[in-house]
Amino acid sequence: MYKWVGSMLLICLFILSGCMNSTDYKDDDVAAMVRGEEITVGYLRFLYTDDAIVEMIDEAVKAKLAEQEVKKMNIDVSKQVKEIKESYGEYPQDELYSAKAQSIRAFADPQARELGIDPKEYYEKYTEVSAEIAAYINVYTSEILGELEDDEFGIEEYNHHASELLDDLVERNKDAIEVRIK
């Protein structure tokens, strides 16, 4: 399940785009407050292209809430983080033509240039952060909904319920969420 969710998260990051102008905000600007915890523009800028930040803020809020819930449950996610991170694989320095290598480079190389770091270094940090996000979401949803069965037809239904669960979590905490960028 972790490979599938991790892969879907990665694919979503490549597809989504929005309308934020990167010069509008500084990295240390607070994009959202979630139960007293900040999500900064720099954190979002590290994960997403500038034109996707506004569209992804709601997803970042859901992820932060899931993280907070899992921490309240006292659940260690390090094993899940490791599994998800391994599913991403390494930055493809020598591999040129595979679809996965091209997809990784299409995202990582411009992000690394924008952030002024080496693409391999960026991708390593990116996989760590995004694996942690996916692990918290996976653990939260599986604690509430149970584990996903190995039935390919159940994935869509499970994801639908997981999405509803996260939406409900946001709704229950709407008074403790403040999105500051639009």
Image (spheres, rainbow, N blue to C red):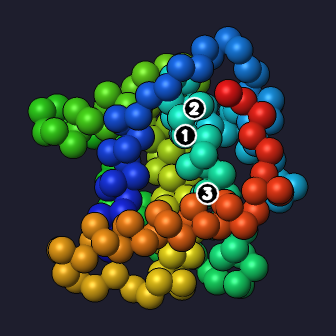
The location of residue 153, given as percent across then percent down, is 18, 74
Identity of the residue drawn at 33% across and 54% down: 8
Q: Which residue is mark 3?
A: 62
Give the vertical position of 170 relative to 180 (above or below): below
**Labels 2 & 1 near each other (Cβ < 8 A):** yes
Q: Residues within 10 Å of mark 1 (few under 14, many from 20)?
A: many
The residue type indicated by label 3 comes to Lys
The location of residue 114, given as percent across then percent down, is 54, 19
- Of residues 56 and 26, which is closer to you in this image? 56
Identity of the residue drawn at 16% across and 39% down: 99
Marks 2 and 1, how far apart at CA: 5 Å
Residue 39's image quarter? top right
Q: Residues within 10 Å of mark 3 (few under 14, many from 20)?
A: many
- Residue furthest left as drawn: 97
Lower sequence index among marks 1 and 3: 1
Q: Which residue is mark 1?
A: 56
Q: Which mark is residue 88?
A: none
**Labels 2 & 3 near each other (Cβ < 8 A):** no
Task: Give the structural element (helix, strand or loop) at label 3.
Answer: helix
Task: Give the structural element (helix, strand or loop) at label 1.
Answer: helix
Identity of the residue drawn at 57% across and 32% down: 53
- Residue furthest right as drawn: 36
Lower sequence index among marks 2 and 3: 2
Give the vertical position of 66 relative to 56 (above or below): below
Is residue 67 left or right of 31 when viewed as pictured? left
Task: Give the structural element (helix, strand or loop) at label 2.
Answer: helix
Q: Which mark is residue 53?
A: 2
The residue type indicated by label 2 comes to Ile
Marks 2 and 3, how far apart at CA: 14 Å
Rendered-image quadrant of the C terminus:
top right
Identity of the residue drawn at 56% across and 49% down: 59
Q: Residues within 10 Å of mark 2 (few under 14, many from 20)?
A: many
